[in-house]
């Protein structure tokens, strides 16, 4: 079975100018406050990691940096079992509006069996969801 | 069969007692309220209330037999939580909430 690309889009209207949002997306100490611990730098080709509270590590590489407009980086999670790995790209697009900024996040990627990912993991769900995934696999549904 | 959103599923399973009841039905199969209550540390009305919430989320199903209702887990209802796209959507929604909080603090 060939891997299938999937896309997640989450958008939000923010009552703040793009310049300010850009700082929150690109300054490591600010990224740490809303996303994860990191060693990000706003330079294409820069490799960095995002470290989740649950101990997981994401391997990332900056792909696109257009100040106040577009930021893209890879969002990969290595795992010895390919079914648990995720290779994806995250793109943030900022569009100025009359009242602030429209933020669009698009994540596209592969997860060969769709069995696993780590979304929601920071909320302490990982173990529980792993158990559920195992249950589902056993139930064959 | 209602199809619950990941939000509803997370909220339903966020309660540890409710989650324990659901996990037991998953592990041990169909059970009556009386059987579940015998091992839970809460009253029968409380167990029934939790079962009602699980049922509304589509996570359990009740089967009437005589005067008793037998409850079983509906694993298919969990599918939205296993699909990575649903889970990432929930993840980004919660991260954007945190981002909004941060942007407010940056004003000060």
Image (cartoon, coloured by chain):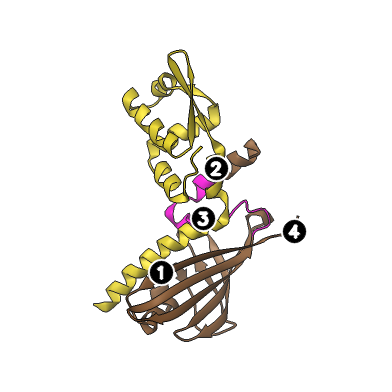
Q: Are marks 3 and 2 on the same chain?
A: no
B76 lies left or right of B96: right
Answer whether labels 1 and 3 touch (C-beta < 8 Å). no
Q: Colour of chain B?
A: yellow
Mark 2 and mark 4: Cα distance apart in space: 25 Å
Question: Which residue carries the number 4 mark?
Answer: A2
Mark 1 and mark 3: Cα distance apart in space: 18 Å
Question: Which residue carries the number 2 mark?
Answer: A132
* Residue at the image position 58 percent from the left and 45 percent from the top: A133
Question: Which residue carries the number 1 mark?
Answer: A12
Question: Which residue carries the number 3 mark?
Answer: B87
Q: Determine whether the residue tagged by mark 1 lies in a helix, strand or loop.
A: strand
Mark 4 and mark 1: Cα distance apart in space: 33 Å
Q: Determine whether the residue tagged by mark 4 lies in a helix, strand or loop.
A: loop
Nearer-the-camera pick, B3 or A105: B3
Magenta region includes residue A130: yes
């Amino acid at each position: 079975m060939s891997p299938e690309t999937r896309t997640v889009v989450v958008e939000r209207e923010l009552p703040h100018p793009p310049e300010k949002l850009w700082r929150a997306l690109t300054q490591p100490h600010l990224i740490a406050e809303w996303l994860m611990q990191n060693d990000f730098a706003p330079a294409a080709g820069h490799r960095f990691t995002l470290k989740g509270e649950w101990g997981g590590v994401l391997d990332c590489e900056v792909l696109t940096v257009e100040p106040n407009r577009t930021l893209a980086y890879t969002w990969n999670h290595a795992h010895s079992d390919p079914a648990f790995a995720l290779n994806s790209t995250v793109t943030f697009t900022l569009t100025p509006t009359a009242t602030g900024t429209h933020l669009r996040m698009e994540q596209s990627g592969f997860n060969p069996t769709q069995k696993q990912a780590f979304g929601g993991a920071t909320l302490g769900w990982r173990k529980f969801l792993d158990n559920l995934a195992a249950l589902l696999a056993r139930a064959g549904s | 069969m209602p199809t619950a959103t990941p939000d509803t599923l997370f909220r339903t399973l966020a309660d540890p007692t409710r989650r324990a009841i659901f996990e037991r039905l998953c592990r041990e199969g169909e059970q009556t309220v009386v059987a579940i209550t015998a091992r839970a540390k809460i009253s029968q009305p409380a167990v029934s209330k939790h079962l009602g919430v699980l049922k509304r989320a589509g996570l359990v199903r009740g089967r009437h037999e005589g005067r008793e209702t037998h409850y079983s887990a509906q694993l298919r209802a969990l599918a939205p939580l296993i699909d990575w796209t649903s889970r990432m959507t929930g993840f980004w929604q919660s991260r954007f909430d945190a981002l909004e909080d941060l942007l407010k603090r940056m004003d000060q």
